[in-house]
Image (cartoon, rainbow, N blue to C red):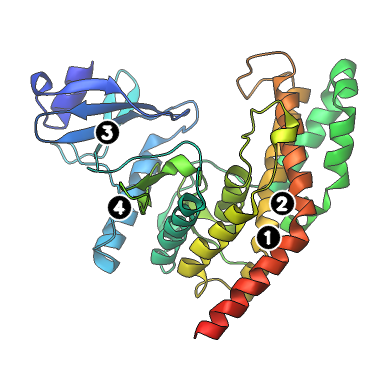
Amino acid sequence: MMDNILNAFGLKPNNYHVASFGSGLINYTWKISGTIQQYILQRINKNVFKAPQDIANNLVQLENYLKQTAPEYLFAAPLPTVNGESLVEDEGNYYRLSPFIKNSHTVDFIEQDKQAYEAAKQFGKFTRLLKDFDLTQLRYTLTDFHNLTLRVEQFKTALANADKERLSNAAAEILQVEANIDIALIYEQLVKGKQIPMRVIHHDTKINNILFDDNNCGLCVIDLDTVMPGYFISDVGDMMRTYLSPANEEERDLSKVQINDDYFIAVYKGYMEEMGSALTATEKDLFIYSGKFMIYMQAIRFLADYLNGDVYYHTQYAEHNLVRTQNQLTLLDRYLQSESKFQGYIAQLEKAFVSSI
């Protein structure tokens, strides 16, 4: 099977070593190593991405645009097959090959504010370079991925159909979700009123979707499957959700779920250095809201899955999704408690920026 795929990309199998690579949870990834060149091979997860060709189409469109408008930008685009195709189909699965970027690495956990700054800067740069891209050329690879209004409706349906034991177990979490429903109402108003523009958004801004050089400087964004039209609050919000706390969503000890103020400042500085001139005034006012938006949405997704009987997210122990819900609601509470501090940091940073002009 692997020989067929390598041959399709013009690589002689006997000249390359194939090994599993990375820590991604969606696609299957291998590093293809030869004496001169190295590559990354991925099998797209069809259970998540129902139309792999839509991903390929998006990346071709973006690559062509960036070649014309920002040829110096490092865009980790897949390589064509010998027949000029973007994907190889083998036994019903789809594969793509990308060059392995030398002297680069990823990190799974933030250890210093520089990493948060560099990552935010790279995600901001990506969207800024594509601010004039024709969004009609992009296909939605995950429909309604960050549609908070839909997620609330799914939660309400799960609430109506849940068994009594799970309703009882999650009673406190249900109340907390309902108490913060204003977060969803703000999103609904933004969308209905078209108060902020659609942009080319990555939608998955985890720290391991950035390539760093040996000095921990950001090189480019990777894992572009979820790139599609969206709102900037998705990218900034996902950074807030996944960067600010040293404890990820799997942590059971909720005392470890805390907010690192330095990481918030780093995200703001990095993203705004790239996108500050492109964002509208309304978008800038929503910078802090973006974190509430994403944390709240992930909390209700975990809770809805728990109420549905754990049918979507893989669980490793009883009440796993409920613990994840508690984790994210704790993060939301810590975030809300820090909101006034965040406003102060932004005011100081903006004042310093104006003074430096």
Q: From this viewpoint, is residue 107 visible?
A: yes
First in sequence: mark 3 vs mark 4: 3
Horizontal side of residue 166 vs 304, given as left or right:
right
Dot 2 or dot 3, earlier in sequence: 3
Residue at 22% over, 34% down: 39
Residue 159, image quadrant: top right
Q: Quadrant of the N terminus?
A: top left
Numbered badge on residue 75: 4
Query: What type is the residue that disc 2 sits on?
Result: Lys
**Could you give the CA–CA distance between mark 1 and mark 4, rounded to whole angstroms?**
29 Å
The Cα–Cα distance between marks 2 and 3, rounded to whole angstroms, is: 35 Å
- Tag 3 residue: 40
Vertical position of residue 134 compared to residue 74: above or below: below
User: Residue 219's spot in the image, x, y percent?
Assistant: 33, 52
Residue at 21% x, 27% y: name it: 32
Q: Amino acid at mark 3?
A: Ile
Is residue 43 or residue 192 the one in the foreground? Answer: 43
Q: Which residue is mark 2?
A: 292
**Numbered circle sitting on residue 288:** 1
Pointer 2 or 4: first along the chain: 4
Q: Are marks 2 and 3 in contact (CB under 8 Å)?
A: no
* Quadrant assignment, res 5: top left
Whether residue 355 sits left or right of residue 190 in the image: it is left
- Badge 2 element: helix
Q: Are marks 2 and 4 in contact (CB under 8 Å)?
A: no
